[in-house]
Amino acid sequence: NKKAFIFDLDGVIVDTAKYHYLAWQKIANQLGIEFTPEHNEELKGVSRVRSLDIILELGKIEADQEHKDKWLVQKNEDYLSYLVDMDESEILSGVVPVLKFLKENNQLIALGSASKNARPILEKTGIISYFDAIVDGNDVTNAKPDPEVFLRAAQLLNVAPENAIVFEDSVAGVQAANIASMTSVGIGEVKVLHEAKFIFPDFTHIEEQFIESLIK
Ligand code: B16
Ligand code: MG
């Protein structure tokens, strides 16, 4: 049976979650809303539009579309300013060896990200050629925990959902993988990602034997 290995982007392949956080924090500060790393956990894997709504709900602020659009543009411009000098050093440790191992073993690799900035990030970090399919925030209408992004990736690779493995750092993403009947691998803390089938603190803890056991 052919397998598909689907990677989330932010927080799994690259450490961009910190930049999303900084950019949202600026917006929140501007609006007088307290925004902590714990609050930020809820934004991981969530679309840009939904993220703003969560922050506004937090501050009990109601805003019209014009203001919301302004903040969304500001957030993205600020976020992109952190990515200007991005290169391969931004790739999280252990990721490239796993990508290489999968390729050497003729496995299919896809990206399944909520981000609309996914492609330029894969290009800047020099790893775009590893991916047989890319599904990102520009391709889907339903955000994680809706399984659309992962189902589309598996479909593009012609692999049944049951034969897909998803690497995710967010609660919403782990839930999306589970709803899709895929094997969820959480990257992060057990206390956050306990719904995942397997959990590792990061890719340096994923051994070749584990990947081999998934390929069989
Ligand atoms: P953008 P992922 C997600 O990416 C991030 O986790 C989330 O924090 C962000 O709001 C979302 O992408 C949208 O990103 O504003 O760049 O379109 O983790 O699904 O790769
Ligand atoms: Mg993520």
Image (tube, rainbow, N blue to C red):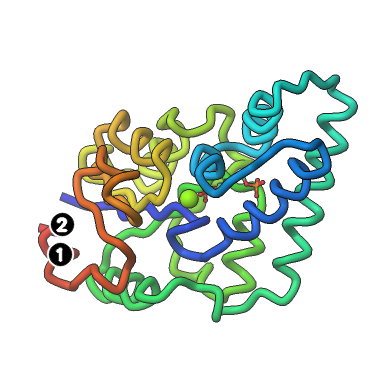
161 up-or-down from 19: above or below: above
Using the rendered view, name the quadrant where residue 102 is placed.
Answer: bottom left
Q: In this orientation, which residue lies closer to the viewer: 175 or 64?
A: 64
Q: Is residue 176 visible?
A: yes
Residue 160 percent location from the top left of the image: 26, 39
Closest to the camera, between mark 1 and mark 2, is: 1
Residue type pointed to by label 1: Phe
Does residue 135 appear in the picture of this structure?
A: no
Tell whether 21 sits left or right of 8: right
Instruction: Establish if 132 lies above or below 157.
Output: below
Tally of numbered discs? 2
In the foreground, 212 or 199 = 199
Which residue position is annotated with label 1? 210
Left or right: residue 35 versus residue 203 is: right
Q: Which mark is residue 214?
A: 2
Q: Residue at x 44, y 52 (%)?
A: 8
Compared to residue 51, the image places residue 124 above or below, namely below
